[in-house]
Image (spheres, rainbow, N blue to C red):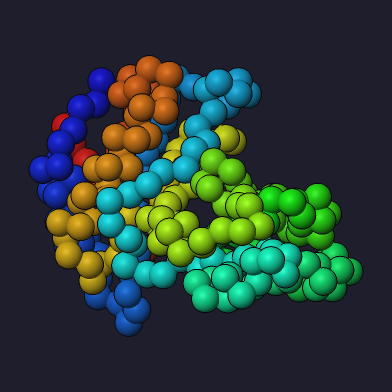
């Protein structure tokens, strides 16, 4: 069983930073959790959930809204891109544009009463990337909605998944952030992950902290 505290994560973060050379860009910091004793073929043993972290990731998460005319003006205020219902047909006919859109944004918000049209036009591109608007993340909304609280929440939301491989790797911040904030995010995410495992800490093989171009450092109990 691997039981850790914030000090464990702090030591690993210090080591990970010392293992990484200075780069010409701002490196991200990832939490890596290697799993054991799970059968990915069993649905009940797959990990797939949306986690909310205490602080943002030090970079803006991009949000696209797929809406009807009822939500168009509201979405323009708070989303990075808005695609209105009348333009869905353009994307349905242009696979390349839809794939570019899927890579461009982290989250997609959908107006609930036009979900069939959204699935038809964007499903093939968004589905494989796990970016279809998901009610578990609050991303399917009524025609009359205040989208700002949702967009604010999505800045601290991450999809955690390990359906095919026994490993979870996710961002917890970047090297320019306050180390205390990175540690808060990493520890919070780890705590949420273990509570989604059938045997909690007993399903954890190892935990690592890694900068984008650096060597991983082990989080030790």
- At horizontal 57% and vertical 26% (from top left) the residue drawn is 40
Which quarter of the rendering shows the C terminus?
A: top left
- Residue 205, image x, y percentages: 34, 29
- Residue 87, image x, y percentages: 80, 73
Between 60 and 27, the one nearer to me in the picture: 60
How many numbered circles does the render carry?
0
- At horizontal 21% and vertical 49% (from top left) the residue drawn is 184
Which quarter of the rendering shows the N terminus?
A: top left
- Residue 219, image x, y percentages: 22, 41
Residue 132 as seen in the image, left or right of residue 157: right
Q: Residue furthest bottom?
A: 24
- At horizontal 77% and vertical 54% (from top left) the residue drawn is 114
Question: Can the viewer see residue 158?
Answer: yes
Quarter location, residue 135: top right
Residue 55 as seen in the image, left or right of residue 155: left
Question: Can the viewer see residue 80?
Answer: no
- Residue 19, image x, y percentages: 22, 60
- At horizontal 61% and vertical 75% (from top left) the residue drawn is 73
Between 111 and 210, the one nearer to me in the picture: 111
Q: Compared with residue 160, is residue 181 higher up or lower down, i.e. above or below?
A: below
């Amino acid at each position: 069983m691997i039981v850790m505290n914030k000090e464990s994560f702090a030591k690993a973060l210090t080591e990970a930073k010392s293992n990484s050379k200075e780069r010409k860009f701002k490196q991200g910091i990832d939490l890596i959790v290697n799993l054991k004793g799970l059968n990915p073929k069993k649905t009940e043993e797959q990990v797939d959930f949306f986690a909310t972290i205490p602080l943002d990731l030090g970079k803006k998460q991009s949000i696209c809204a797929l809406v009807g005319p009822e939500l168009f003006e509201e979405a323009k205020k708070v989303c990075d891109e808005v695609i209105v219902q009348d333009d869905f047909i353009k994307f349905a006919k242009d696979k390349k544009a839809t794939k570019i859109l899927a890579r461009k944004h982290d989250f997609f918000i959908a107006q609930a009463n036009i979900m069939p049209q959204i699935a038809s036009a964007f499903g093939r591109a968004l589905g494989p990337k796990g970016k279809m608007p998901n009610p578990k993340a609050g991303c399917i909304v009524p025609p009359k909605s205040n989208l700002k609280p949702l967009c604010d929440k999505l800045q601290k939301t991450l999809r955690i998944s390990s359906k095919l491989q026994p490993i979870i790797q996710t961002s917890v911040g970047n090297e320019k952030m306050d180390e205390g904030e990175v540690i808060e995010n990493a520890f919070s995410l780890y705590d949420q992950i273990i509570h989604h495992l059938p045997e909690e800490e007993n399903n954890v093989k190892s935990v690592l902290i890694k900068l984008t171009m650096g060597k991983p450092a082990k989080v030790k109990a």
